[in-house]
Image (tube, helix red, strand yellow):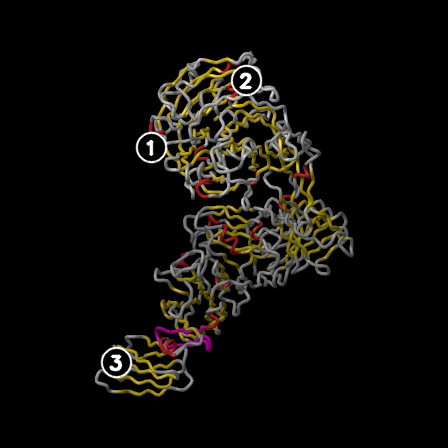
Amino acid sequence: MKKSLLVLLFISTVCFAQTPCSGGFANSYPCDGITLQDYISSAAMGAAEAQDSWGWTDPSTNKEYAIVALDNGTAFVDISNPTDIKYLGRMDSYTGSSYWRDVKIYNNHAYIVSDSNGSHGVQIFDLTRLRGLTGSPALNFNKNGDGRFSGVGSAHNIIINEETGYAYVLGSNRNGGGPRILDLSNPKNPTLAGDISAYGYCHDAQVVVYDGPDPDYQGKEILIGSFSNLDYVQILDVTNKSNVTRISFIDYINKEYTHQGWFTEDKRFFITGDELDEGTHGFNTKTIVFDLTDLDNPLKHYVHYGATSATDHNGYVRGNRFYLANYAAGMRVFKVDGLYDETNPTMDEINYFDMYTPDNSANFHGTWNVYPFFESGNIIATGFGNLSTNGDGGLFILKDPNYDNTPPTASCQNFTATLDRVTGTVTITANDIDNGSTDNFGIVKKSLEASKTTFTCADVGKTFEVTLTVEDDYANKSSCTATVTIEAETTSYNGATWSNGAPSLGSNAKISANYNTATNSSFETCTCEVDSSRTLTVAAGDYINVQRDITVNGNLYIAHEGSVVQQDNDATTINNGTISVEKITPNLDERDFMILGSPVSGETRNGVYGTSVMVRNHITANFTPNPQVDDEFPLAENFADDNGDNWVNYTGTINAGEGYLVRPQTTPTGIGSFTLDYTQGTLNNGIVNFNLIYNGSQESSPNMLSNPCPSAIDADAFLDANPTIETLYFWEHLTAPNPSYPGYNPNNYNMNDISMYNEMGGSEAGNDPGTSTRPNGFIASGQGFGVKTSAAATAVFNNSMRVNENNDTYRRTAFESDRIWLQVRNEKWDMGSSILVGFSEISTDAFESKYDSKRLATPVSLYSEMASGEQLAIQGRAPLTDETEVLLGFDTQINEETTYHISISDIQGPIIENATVYLIDNKSSTVTNLSEDDYELTAEKGNFNSRFTLQFKSNQELDTSESLSQIAIFPNPANQLLNITSPSTYLKNIAVYDLLGRRINEKVDPNNNTHQLSLKTLNTGIYFVKIDTEVGTVTKKLIKK
């Protein structure tokens, strides 16, 4: 505050009876919603003007007192009867008059400072001396009071942290005006505890033990102050009084004189004002709100412009209100609840009382301070009046007639929330839980605190504790708790229709009449019940998808290739009736076997497989890779054991997730298709674990697993969840055992009957002349498969892997990559193999176990080679370009010279489907356009590493330069033959020139993109090959070896 010195004139006391605000006035004072209870003028307290003020509640009597800082002393007023206040007396200034005096209270003592007032120091007054005083007569206490701290002279302000007992003297003549810290352990004899000088003059501050939202500083003593010399708000950690550190500072635009501010009660926001910006810049009263969720990074949150242009002074927060001493505009009251609206924060003015009636200009007259912290709701407002009149300000006792410090009474009721059938969600509100909560003035806000208030099918059958909080206009709160139970909305099938619409995400589908998905339809639901004596049939190719629980009181029949999916891992299937899962094998010859598992929990060897000729389980610890196979195929994957002791006859329970070798034929010579009905226990569901055995090396660690679910699972999801499993192997029972296959038996099974899958895709079994055994990325219900684990681990199946369809093993799904499948076949011996090479953004040319799988030890094999030596049946590569080359090897164990054909069996992907695929035989220098023709080669028994190179050329429309740039000659250097390829334009003529300019013309057949040029007649040296095409000519340098 800044004001010219006036001559002190005493005028008589002005008093009012209690005056409510009516018609916008209380007596002559403009107002809104504030009652004037009483008033005493500055003159009546022996002064020209009132300045700061604070309140004291006597802890022994609960009587309330106003401590009023005057220009020439400090007054003490009993306001316990707010409509008949009693002036008890005063204590004179220690040194003289000043226009700035400030007072704060701690431990029943008042601490008083005065600015521009010589050696005033800190006066101390024991407030218990006011007990029993009536004001008749008013006393004049000695200026020495009950103590004095002389370690400062003049000071503008004093702040006290009542929680710690430290006072902070601000703007003094010592320490550069920075905070001087006093220890008030002895309230009448403070001692110096520290100085803060690094940040300059401090005008006002708030000091708290921080309990706000920033966990880094909770429990610390924090000073947030207006350091007006630089016009910054500084945030300091003052916990260690001898080592104060700055946390951060706050800057803002149009700063003129940073004055004062106050935290909201949750310490999230800091509300501050600048004392001179209105007068300098001409805008209305400006209040700035900073978001201090992160004390290290304060953010401007909101700026409020008031209803007038008056200058703002001191402001304080109590509850959900901000009380502002707004000089000429009086006391203004704002609701701070709106600050918590993240998208449209507000701070609405709800009440005011204007003690200065001439105008609302940006000048220093009117209300200096407001104190809103009395439990009674009485408000102290102090200040001075007209610039030209002394003694007309003083102390105003105000109150909101709707002030309320009585909490509401919260009443709760338990609630059952029913999901919306279509959306599958339900959201509860406070009104659902409220059972008639009450408040003396009325409840204005209800809120719920809970782990969630919006529920889905995943919550059905569960209960949740919620807390209802009701709040009145003064933010008094009361809470109670209730239990919320979640249920699905029942719709019953009665034989013709559903009672409440077809099942959907929020339904409990109740089967009250026989239901067959083949004649009705598949459905998805939250929960499902099958009534007693009723049957739910899930037909082949159909499904029911149930997020939560299934209760079978009647019959549930899942036909072969039908699917039941449950989504939540903790969902249950309760079998109070009968459950049957049907699986039908393919046609099997007399010695064919399958790898199978059970989709139900209680099956045994003597149950579903009771009539089967053989059931064996795999003992990984007994597996030793067959040395004969290893010798013949050292870089291939080997599933042949050295002596066959890894498969042993099995009796007992069929374990979930385990794969068993089953010959379902009823007699040793039986053939045909066999139906297996899994009926014991209930459906497997949720998390199923299988203990993977590691037998010293990955090569020696085959484990046999099976899909334990009554639906297909996504193979990629399974691989993602199990990092020690890189490739899945499926037995396809294509050929009979044969003595020509290496192994421990006279007749051995052929590993060419194994298909394989990794996250790049599937490769069909080598003995498959087509693509029917190529894994499609899904594993059917009960389907067994092999893996080789890279470490001891637990294989996990869970419900997130389950899918509605693809329970026939052979359906395809889209894969966002470019992929090519090649086959090599020998028709005479009906042998061959396949290879998959895929190109994608998620794979690289380096070896990656997720996308690269070793070839199997098969009699005939085509494989891709890596520079590091791996021989792969599935290879993942970086994205496909015209420069991509894939090196291929070839192996045959057929002990004669015979003919083989290499062909494309399938191709998928947006780039590769629009490209030409070339196979280069690196031995014969032959180039074949595999996109148009198969390649035929004759070979004897042997291993031919790096025999072929696979190349790709885009078929897109190119301009002349691009077409010519794609023309290639190879090999270069060359010896006998030179291959010329022109992927994008036909060749017309070829001419070869030596360094002497001699020319050799070569005729080219029309409409060809490739040509093979004989170099036999050329001597060793350097030549130039001129290539004429339909779009132009290009010349290439050639080295003849």
Q: Relative to the observer, which residue lies in front, 927 or 222?
A: 222
Q: Which residue carries the number 1 mark?
A: 198
Secondary element under disc 2, as helix, strand or loop, is strand
Residue 921 is covered by the magenta coloring: yes
When asked about the image quadrant of residue 539, the answer is bottom right
Image spot of residue 307 (x, y percent):
55, 40
Mark 3: which secondary structure? strand
Q: Could you say where residue 205 lies in the image, as x and y percent from the top left?
A: 44, 30
Query: Which label is found at residue 87?
Result: 2
Instruction: Say which amino acid is labelled 3.
Output: Tyr
- Amino acid under disc 2: Tyr
Magenta-highlighted residues: 915-936
Residue 557: x and y in percent read 69, 53
Instruction: Locate the C terminus by quadrant.
Output: bottom left
Q: Nearer the viewer, residue 875 or 648?
A: 875
Q: Tag 1: Cα neighbours inside 10 Å, few (<14), some, or many (≥20)?
A: few
Q: Residues within 10 Å of mark 2 (few under 14, many from 20)?
A: many
